[in-house]
Amino acid sequence: MGMPETMRAVRITMHGGPEVLEPVEAAVPAAGEGEVLVRVASVALNNTDLWTRGGAYGRPDDPEALSGWRGPIDFPRIQGADVAGRIVAVGAGVADDLVGRRVVVDPAIYDADGPDANPVGLMGSERDGGYAEYVTAPARRVHDVTDSPLTDDQIAALPTAYGTALGMIERGRVRAGETVLVSGASGGVGIALVQLARARGATVLAISSGSKIRAVREAGAHAVVDRAGDVVDQLRAAAPGGVDVALDVVAGDLVSEGVALLREGGRWVIAGALGGYRTTLDVRRLYLHNAQVIGSAMHTPAHFDLLVGLARRAEVQPVIAATFALEQAARAQEELARRNHVGKLVLHP
């Protein structure tokens, strides 16, 4: 049976609101040298989909510039970083026995070959992604999860959210017995941080709000403070001895007020700016306490290998909030932007 020549896909041709997501018939991409072709079973949504679509990342010389994850986007672009599926074809130089394997794709595009390479691009932003029936990926970036007990939807939930969370935990050097603060705890990365930090043996203190607090507790938080109140006062009451590591996707004022909560040698790890990208800092709270502020973008290949191990053993259980047909991508992104759900939203091509 030959491969079809065309596929259903959803792409963007410009920055804008959900209306710029167009369902189209596109050519099935060919696996190039060193690449595989994956038939997409599930593709999970992330905030990065919204921000790439909207051009929200700014540029070093112009924070307000419309830009993709690491610079201008080549349009048209098929979005979608988080793919679970099966390999259906391989390009030159790739072993045929990969065909038929169930895989998760590491969506990062790295600056080097080694295990500690930095991500400098992202599938769905710097190359076409998984809002489609088929997607290509470098063979070395697909990982066999055929035997994982997790569902395709759960596997698709892992790469960006759990990869980003594991990168934060590794860069923050979280150890068993430490007290860890998680901001934005009901979001995709937040729930992943709660689950992963708990699995590592940390005491998890989370910030969430309203109806989501219960879900954050169920994900493994030892205590949850309500964003609606005075967060720093509540945190002091919940962790009178301070915090070893803050795992923060909110930033903004939380950084300026929260760094004083760090214990001696504490680490404040930032991987998002949901609360705003400008912050002020009393640097005395850093140097007098040997504290660190650490930026963390996604994961390294070594971090992703750790994540795949967790997936194969089902040591984390991603929560799926809702699934949508591929053609409902715009509706799914609107739902994501509303932030009324806990867990991941997934498209089924």
Image (tube, grey):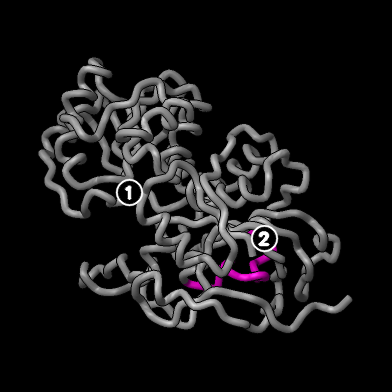
Q: Which mark is residue 140?
A: 2
Residue at x 56% of width, y 69% of height: 327
Dot 1 alpha-carbon crowd within 10 angstroms: few under 14, some 14 to 19, many 20 or more: some
Judge whether 169 appears above or below 39 on screen: above
Visible residue check, residue 318 = yes
Residue at x 36% of width, y 30% of height: 213
Visible residue check, residue 114 = no
Residue at x 59% of width, y 57% of height: 106
Three-letter code, disc 2: Arg
Quadrant location of the N terminus in the rendered image:
bottom right
Please tell me which residue lies in front, 134 or 10: 10
Please tell me which residue lies in front, 41 or 159: 41
Q: Are marks 1 and 2 in contact (CB under 8 Å)?
A: no
Judge whether 33 appears above or below 98 on screen: below
Disc 1: which residue: 295
Residue at x 48% of width, y 41% of height: 166
Three-letter code, disc 1: Gly
Quadrant location of the C terminus in the rendered image:
bottom right
Spatial distance from mark 1 to mark 2, Cα to Cα? Answer: 26 Å
Q: Position of residue 10 (x, y in %)?
A: 54, 74
Judge whether 134 appears above or below 168 on screen: below
Tally of marks: 2
Q: Left or right? Give the position of 226 relative to 40.
A: left
Find out whether residue 192 is within the magenta segment. no
Q: Left or right? Give the position of 343 relative to 91.
A: left
Judge whether 279 appears above or below 77 on screen: above
Q: Secondary structure at mark 2?
A: helix
The stretch in magenta equals 126-141
Q: Which mark is residue 115?
A: none
